[in-house]
Image (tube, rainbow, N blue to C red):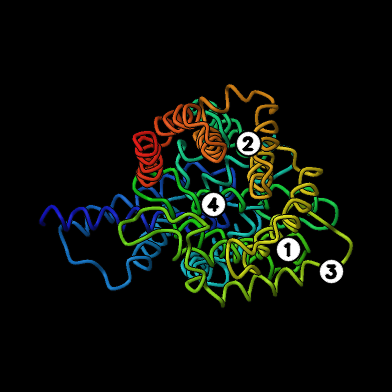
């Protein structure tokens, strides 16, 4: 096979791993139980390795995702046939598997059961006996196929910390034989907020990816939206916050086509062609935002969705209701006082011609020195605000720092363009 074709197979397998591995793991865990998670991950990994080998030297199957599921299913049947005892399977399925292994496994690979199994898997990973940071890391790894480095980036930590969290979580599941179930009553609500966090992080990583060659990873956003929609349709997940989170995803996803030009360069919000925004998704966003208004709950997802809705309501960047945006950010800060929310609020202040006040807010952030030397977004925003003040020296200083910190090639091009503009301004 030619090198280009081999590259194509590798990209396809990588794409399918993101979309299918979580489904395969969820189904196999329903069969073998959570305490066999490591064995199950090995089975799934083996399926993808076989795919790379088979598809590189033979013709691609008509249905690659179905091929992977078939391999995993056959491997599961093979393991069952080799076993003399059934203690290692989840107790609820042991008798069924013993009586009719192949038919049972066929049933578990149906689309309905796959969807249900993934929701069960998310809630199992978000078991309250686990530390919250371990719950999030385990769910991103197991259900969404995140690599260790991606999880570390999403959670603002390093690979070693994530490895430790994953080991700790898996050992807990193994030692305590946690069942794969969607809880009810109070236990359900105690897990839901972590489930929301996982879906939120998954979407965000896709919406503004740190992969060098991809600003937007639509597959991650689509997966987050698929899982969130499943949650809205399940009796356990039909909650105002679930509707608000899905609404937020719809509003954000509606702008995909306007965020990059034909050269894969970033188009800033103020320059985006709003005619290209997906009106069907915007309408869906409003629909779920209205659903989220049932009851008296006001979560961070309600507020973030309302902020995104304000952008969609405005016919242009200039007509955005920035005063209303500031009110929403003030409300959001009461529930989510994080550096990133404060940074975004400062950007809104600058749009209200309060750039000096915006800079003051940023410089008063706790650990701001660490933030501007470790996360490019803080240096990038500072650079932009100093441009607005006409302070070319500080603007250049912080933009250059952001240029070093970002791994995104599109971000680097955008920052480089701003730096070149500053140089031209000085020359004139």
What element does badge 3 sit on? loop
**If you read the primary sequence from the N terminus, does the residue marked by circle 3 or circle 4 appear first?**
4
**If you read the primary sequence from the N terminus, does the residue marked by circle 2 or circle 1 appear first?**
2
Residue located beneath label 2 in the image: 134
Mark 1 is surrounded, within 10 Å at the Cα level, by few (under 14), some (14 to 19) or many (20 or more) other residues, namely: many
Left-right relation of 253 to 48: right
Marking on residue 67: none
Asked if the residue at tag 4 contacts the one at tag 3, i.e. Cβ–Cβ closer than 8 Å, the answer is: no
Mark 2 is surrounded, within 10 Å at the Cα level, by few (under 14), some (14 to 19) or many (20 or more) other residues, namely: many
**If you read the primary sequence from the N terminus, does the residue marked by circle 3 or circle 1 appear first?**
1
Image quadrant where one finds the C terminus: top left
Disc number lying in front (3 or 2): 3
Find the distance from the CA under tag 4 to the CA under tag 1.
17 Å
Q: Find the residue positioned furthest to the left.
A: 2
Residue located beneath label 4 in the image: 143
Is 364 above or below relative to 384?
A: above
Q: Is residue 137 visible?
A: yes
Q: Position of residue 227 (x, y in %)?
A: 59, 62
Residue located beneath label 3 in the image: 294
Q: Residue at x 22, y 59 (%)?
A: 55
What element does badge 1 sit on? loop
Disc number lying in front (3 or 1): 3
Residue located beneath label 1 in the image: 237
Q: Position of residue 290 (x, y in %)?
A: 76, 72
**If you read the primary sequence from the N terminus, does the residue marked by circle 3 or circle 2 appear first?**
2
Q: Residue at x 57, y 22 (%)?
A: 370
**If you read the primary sequence from the N terminus, does the residue marked by circle 4 or circle 1 appear first?**
4
What element does badge 2 sit on? helix
Q: Position of residue 145 (x, y in %)?
A: 47, 49
């Amino acid at each position: 096979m030619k090198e280009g074709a081999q590259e194509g197979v590798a990209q396809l397998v990588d794409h399918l791993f993101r979309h299918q591995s979580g489904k395969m793991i969820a189904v196999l865990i329903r069969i073998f139980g959570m305490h066999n998670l490591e064995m199950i991950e090995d089975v799934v990994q083996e399926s993808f390795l076989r795919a790379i080998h088979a598809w590189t030297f033979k013709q691609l199957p008509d249905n690659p995702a179905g091929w992977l599921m078939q391999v995993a299913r056959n491997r599961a049947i093979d393991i069952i046939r080799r076993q003399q005892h059934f203690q290692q399977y989840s107790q609820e399925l042991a008798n069924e598997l013993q009586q009719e292994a192949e038919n049972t496994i066929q049933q578990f690979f149906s689309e309905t059961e796959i969807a249900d199994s993934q929701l069960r898997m998310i809630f199992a990973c978000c078991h309250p006996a686990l530390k919250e940071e371990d719950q999030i890391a385990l769910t991103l790894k197991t259900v969404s196929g995140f690599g260790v480095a991606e999880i570390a980036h999403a959670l603002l930590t390093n690979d070693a910390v994530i490895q430790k969290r994953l080991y700790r979580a898996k050992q807990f599941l193994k030692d305590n034989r946690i069942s794969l179930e969607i809880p009810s009553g109070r236990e359900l609500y105690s897990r839901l907020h972590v489930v929301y966090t996982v879906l939120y992080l998954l979407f965000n990583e896709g919406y503004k990816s740190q992969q060098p060659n991809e600003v937007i990873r639509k597959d991650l956003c689509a997966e987050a939206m698929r899982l969130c929609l499943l949650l809205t349709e399940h009796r356990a997940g039909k909650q105002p916050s679930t509707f608000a989170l899905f609404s937020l995803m719809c509003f954000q996803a509606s702008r995909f086509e306007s965020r990059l030009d034909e050269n894969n360069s970033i188009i800033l919000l103020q320059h985006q062609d709003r005619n290209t925004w997906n009106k069907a998704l915007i309408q869906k966003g409003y629909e779920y935002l209205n659903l989220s208004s049932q009851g008296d709950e006001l979560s961070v997802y309600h507020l973030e969705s309302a902020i995104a809705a304000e952008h969609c309501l405005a016919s242009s960047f200039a007509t955005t209701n920035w005063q209303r945006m500031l009110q929403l950010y003030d409300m959001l800060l009461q529930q989510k006082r994080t550096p990133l929310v404060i940074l975004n609020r400062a950007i809104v202040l600058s749009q209200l011609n309060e750039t000096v006040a915006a800079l003051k807010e940023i410089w008063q952030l706790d650990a701001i020195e660490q933030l501007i030397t470790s996360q490019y977004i803080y240096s990038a925003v500072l650079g932009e605000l100093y441009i607005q003040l006409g302070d070319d020296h500080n603007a250049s200083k912080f933009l250059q720092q952001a240029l070093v910190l970002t791994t995104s090639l599109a971000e680097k091009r955008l920052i480089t363009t701003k730096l070149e503009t500053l140089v031209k301004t000085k020359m004139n």
